[in-house]
Image: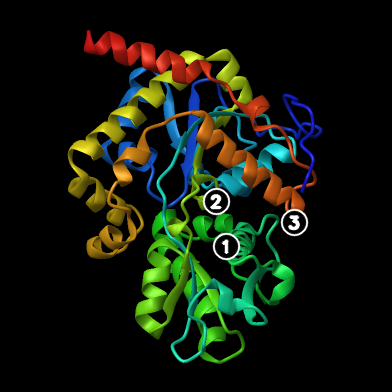
Amino acid sequence: MSTIIESHDRPSAALPPIPSAQDEVWYTRCPVPTPFALALQTGALADEVTGAGLKWRALQESSDPATHSSHFTHLKQNSFRHGGNIPAIWARARGADTRLVGLTWVELSYVVLALPGSGIESAADLRGRRLLVPRQSDAGLDFWQASVLRTYETALASASLTLDDVTLVEQSTARPTFADRALASEEPLGSWALYGHYGFQQGTLLPLLRGEVDAIASQGNHALELAGLSGAQVVFDLRDLADSKLRVNNDTPDTLTVSGSFAAQHPDRVALVIVQLQKAAAGAAARPDEATRLFARDVAIAEALAAAALPTDFAAGLEVSLDAARLEGLQGQVDFLSRHGFIERAFDVEGWVDRRPLELAAGITSEERA
């Protein structure tokens, strides 16, 4: 187990930020179920920010590759990011000036799949088997490899096994990076859904079908598609574990982070964004079918597939929070990434948190209801 270092504002030497104009607010989010995605599609976030006289800009609108890559590095000033926690943790550990202002907790499935007739019916049957670990050779951060390893480690631990009890089969790929795909497309999320999505699927499924590995890991709607295409069966699902701390992976929880200087200078502006996210979460709770349709459209998949991939109570997890259980789960992810060398050293999540925007947002919401 890794040792948690003392809390610091920035765990490593600060990396130089990418400048932004004072009237610009930038954003990016992952193609996963978040209130940020909902509020973007309804126009609520754009209306809120532009109504304050600011320019609301997606990182993917820029022609600058470094700005695109801020989806992972979070070096763009005046920027928000809502999505998978592994890139957010990695950026923080490398010295990016960010603050954690909220977490959402929609539990997507993280599964291990094996073919019928393989003799693998449960996590215990993985002992001595070959497990696929994809490796993107040109990635600064291989978040998918980290996610797969976390899935395997948790699955094996549920059967009192470790990674030493299996053979990890690495397979390198050289797919275009997120920034490269976005620069090549006028619709970057469409590009991600088409090339990133199916590229991941191909690289995961073919080694299983060719008999090069005995089991693979997947997530959410990807897992449903792989099972449908191959006939593979789920032998482990993270969501079946009773302890919520063990159900952590890249998208559980999703992190809402913001540039540190922006949070320090304009906590009221950050709060206004959070207000819109809370409204989007409340809207999803009241109209879950509509939210499912929006999520499906956001990631360019069939609505029925989105409905099957989402947990029945997904709307409850969309509320932005900094409660102790979510933070404890995130701390476990930091420790995991440090233990496996994805970040240089662990850090204290509590020292990353800025609660002021969330508290201000709660005050604004209370006033609106009064």
Badge 2 vs badge 1, beta-carbon distance below 8 Å: yes
> For the C terminus, which image quadrant?
top left
Mark 3 or mark 1, whichever is nearer to me? 1
Of pointers 3 and 1, the one earlier in the residue sequence: 1
Could you tell me which secondary element the residue under label 1 belongs to? helix
Coordinates of residue 129 in the picture (x, y in percent): 64, 82
Let me know if residue 63 appears in the view. Answer: yes
Q: Measure how far apart labels 2 and 1 are at the Cα level.
A: 10 Å
Q: Measure how far apart labels 3 and 2 are at the Cα level.
A: 17 Å
Q: Residue furthest front?
A: 160
Residue named by callout 3: 340
Could you tell me which secondary element the residue under label 3 belongs to? loop
Q: Identify which residue is drawn at 63% across, 44% down.
A: 332
Residue 290 higher or lower than 122, as above or below: above
Could you tell me which secondary element the residue under label 2 belongs to? helix
Coordinates of residue 120 in the picture (x, y in percent): 52, 82
Residue 302 numbered tag: none
Residue named by callout 1: 158
Q: Is residue 362 left or right of residue 97?
A: left
Residue 174 higher or lower than 64, as above or below: below
Let me know if residue 73 appears in the view. Answer: no
Q: Identify which residue is drawn at 31% across, 63% down.
A: 301
Q: Amino acid at mark 3?
A: His
Residue named by callout 2: 246
Q: Is residue 90 left or right of residue 281?
A: right
Of pointers 2 and 1, the one earlier in the residue sequence: 1
Mark 3 or mark 2, whichever is nearer to me? 2
